[in-house]
Amino acid sequence: MLTSKFSSAKREINPSTESKNPEDDSVQKVRVFVRKKRAKKTVQPIVEVVKPEIVDQKPCSLPEIEDFAYGKQSSYSRSNEVQPPANWEKVIEGIRKMRSSEDAPVDSMGCEKAGVSLPPKEGRFAVLISSLLSSQTKDHVNHGAIQRLLQNDLLTAETIDKADEGVIKELIYPVGFYSRKASNMKKVAKICLEKYGGDIPSTLEELLQLPGIGPKMAHLVMNVGWNNVQGICVDTHVHRICNRLGWVSRLGTKQKTSTPEQTRESLQLWLPKEEWVPINPLLVGFGQTVCTPLRPRCGMCTVSGLCPSAFTETPSLSATPKKNKR
DNA sequence: ATCCGGACTA
DNA sequence: TAGTCTGGAT
């Protein structure tokens, strides 16, 4: 019912086409199983032009972060204080230099853009929705979806609550998991409307109650939406790289952490709070270009000398002859 | 063919 | 802990 401008972009997400043919049963669900394969893929450096538009004009007030940060730092007087890993500052500095010379797809946090040029309340809501959509989705895809929502005035709790879920689905396509996310958007909008006056929750706990908002996104929303740093935003890159660097471990052991949440808790024990926000874009970009999940490019990493995992994950490719393709 | 800048469920 | 939800990029 909204404008017709997106009707031309309709995709085949209409289930009505498949429900009438009984023969489909034999054909459907041909699903490719994820099989373990020899890591044979060469990782190309991701080179992409990143717009140098740094978001400086946040509608929110700036730092009350730092006061809080230093206050916390000095309160470590308890018995077991965790000491930072050796040379962590050099490592961060080195990664920063690599990042400044190499473009990565990440341009800080993708949903940061969502809130600019909007009034605070609408901006916050946009940040929340953008976070909701952005998981497992490329930033430019997410950005496109946000633009389409914005153009159709579907970026507030009120309008989303009233909108048809199918319409939302079409608008946010092709973000990953768009169907589930459209459903989550409706639920989130209703909750925000009924419990928070159309605004978004202002605490971590309340954000985590929202469907589709987990720890990673909840911290992101606190950081960007409220400018209130409650914890580190840990995604798979931060998780992986911190373990490779030996920066985190399970409490009381030297074992690697097994979940991003464990990583977050471990990292927060020693990383100074000024670094809690910048550590995410720093390591995400680093993880996309150098410290990749598969075959990290230790040869071009300037801090490999300080990394306990350097060159340990490079498989000997001798054992894998080139099979026939396809 | 394989990988995503997660969250949720069994 | 593993499977599932998703389509696009490489």
Image (cartoon, coloured by chain):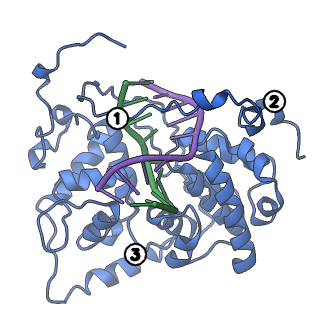
Chain colours: A blue, B green, C purple
Numbered label attached to residue A78: none
Please tell me which residue is depicted at 49% across the width and 36% down the height of the picture.
A50
- Where is residue A198? Give x, y as percent: 74, 72
Label 3: how many residues lie within 10 Å, few (<14), some (14-19) or many (20+)? few
Mark 1 residue crowding within 10 angstroms, few (<14) / some (14–19) / many (20+)? some
Rendered location of residue A110, percent (x, y): 53, 49
Tell me if label 3 and label 2 are in contact, CB under 8 Å: no
Query: Circle 1 sits in a helix, a strand or a loop, which is it?
Result: loop
| Identity, as a three-letter code, of the amino acid under mark 1 | Glu
Nearest to viewer (mark 2 / mark 1): 2
Report, in whole angstroms, how far the alpha carbon at label 3 lies from the one at label 1. 29 Å
Q: Considering the image in quadrants, where does the C terminus of chain A appear? A: top left
User: Which residue is identified by label 3?
Assistant: A66
Q: Amino acid at mark 2?
A: Ser
CA distance for labels 2 and 1: 38 Å
Q: Can you identify the residue that label 2 sits on?
A: A8
Of marks 3 and 2, the one in the foreground: 2
Q: Quadrant of residue A239?
A: bottom left
Instruction: Where is residue A133? Give x, y as percent.
Output: 59, 51
What residue does disc 1 label? A102
Give the mark nearest the N terminus, 3 or 1: 3
Q: Secondary structure at mark 2?
A: helix
Neighbours of disc 2 within 10 Å: few (<14), some (14-19), many (20+): few
Residue A61 visible in image: no
